[in-house]
Amino acid sequence: MQNAGMAALGLDWRYLACSVRPEELGAAIEGARAMRFLGLNLTVPHKLLAVAMVDALDESARMWGAVNTIRFEAQDDRGEWRPLGDFQDVPTGPVRAHGFNTDADAISRSLREDLALEPTEARVLLLGAGGAGRTAALKLASEGTAALYLVNRTESKAADLAREISERFPKQSVSVGYPLSGPVDLVLNATSLGLGTNDGMPFDPDRFDLRRAAAVYDMIYRPSETPLLRAARAAGCRVANGLGMLLYQGARALELWSGQKAPTGVMRRALELNVYGFDSYARSGKLEP
């Protein structure tokens, strides 16, 4: 995805995947700084750890309490910090690590673009209160969703998240457990149930009927259709998986490093070919940048 996007923008850059143990994350960030990497993406469990390891935090990282993107920066002749990608020659002076979070905006953008769902004023049943679920819940609360229902295997974790939401967004309606009656606009799965071939549903069918949901979003993108999405489609729900979230968080990271608009069509095609082995744009005849 990133290499395809960089090539489309005419950037002579390369994106590499590296396995780093949590206890060596600090050393890895310092090594990337020393080698004048342009930036980094971080995934679990590094996102929370990195908050204390960068030199500056963007408002997005402060807001959501996690860093999934680092941009390395140097000072120009006026003493202003600029992305390393802006410099024609490799800077020899100090380099700082600037932390961002692109996950939260990617969630709401994917809901809007892949499900045609406006999170504002939606009734949402959120399954999972861990890292991804917490970010999703806080983002939805910040946009003023009508109601949030939090369900987690360990109920105390959902209760802790509900308290955090109430403290940070006092006007947000949030409760722990399934909605007792009425429809919901969205069921959002932020658990890992669905990754395994023998996984069950991430919710209790005795306590919630998918026919009450207008749309279902599963953050899992491999397999492309989880048991949850299959059941939701059969129940008449609009459905989408997490490929869009993966795409949009990566596209925003590329924009932060390059200062250019990310070619999301090219990046989506690269993702689909790599993850699923097909190109939906080629099938549909669409020509998107």
Image (spheres, rainbow, N blue to C red):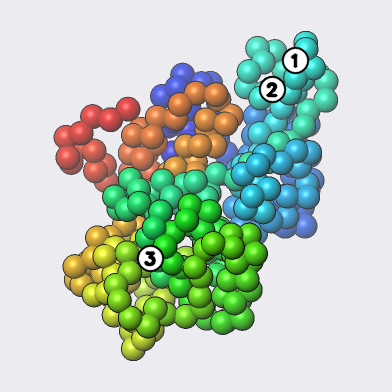
Badge 2, how many Cα within 10 Å: few under 14, some, many 20+?
some
The answer to which of 147 and 133 lies nearer the viewer is 147
Badge 2 or badge 1: first in the primary sequence: 1
Alpha carbon of mark 3 to alpha carbon of mark 2: how far? 41 Å
Q: Is residue 114 above or below residue 160?
A: above
**From the viewer's perspective, is 278 left or right of 59?**
left
Q: Nearer the viewer, mark 3 or mark 2?
A: 3
Q: Residue at 75% of width from left, 19% of height from top?
A: 80
Q: Is tag 1's residue or tag 3's residue first in the polypeptide sequence?
A: 1
State left or right for residue 5 relative to residue 133.
left
- Label of residue 82 in the image: 2
Q: Give the camera-side residue of 18 and 214.
A: 214
Q: How much space separates mark 1 and mark 3, taking CA atoms?
A: 48 Å
Residue type indicated by callout 1: Asp
The residue at the point 55 percent across, 70 percent down is 129
Mark 3 vs 2: CB contact within 8 A: no
- Quadrant in which the C terminus appears: top left
Picture quadrant of residue 73: top right
What percent of the width, then of the height, locates residue 88?
65, 12
Q: Quadrant of residue 217?
A: bottom left
Q: Earlier in the sequence, mark 3 or mark 2?
A: 2
Q: In which quadrant will I find the N terminus? A: top left
At label 1, counting other C-alpha atoms closer than 10 Å, the crowd grade (few under 14, some 14-19, many 20 or more) is some
Marks 2,1: beta carbons within 8 A: yes
Is label 3 in a helix, a strand or a loop? strand
226 left or right of 44 in image: left
Q: Amino acid type of disc 3?
A: Arg
Q: Residue at point 73% right, 50% down?
A: 51
- Residue denoted by label 1: 76
Provide the residue designation for mark 3: 123
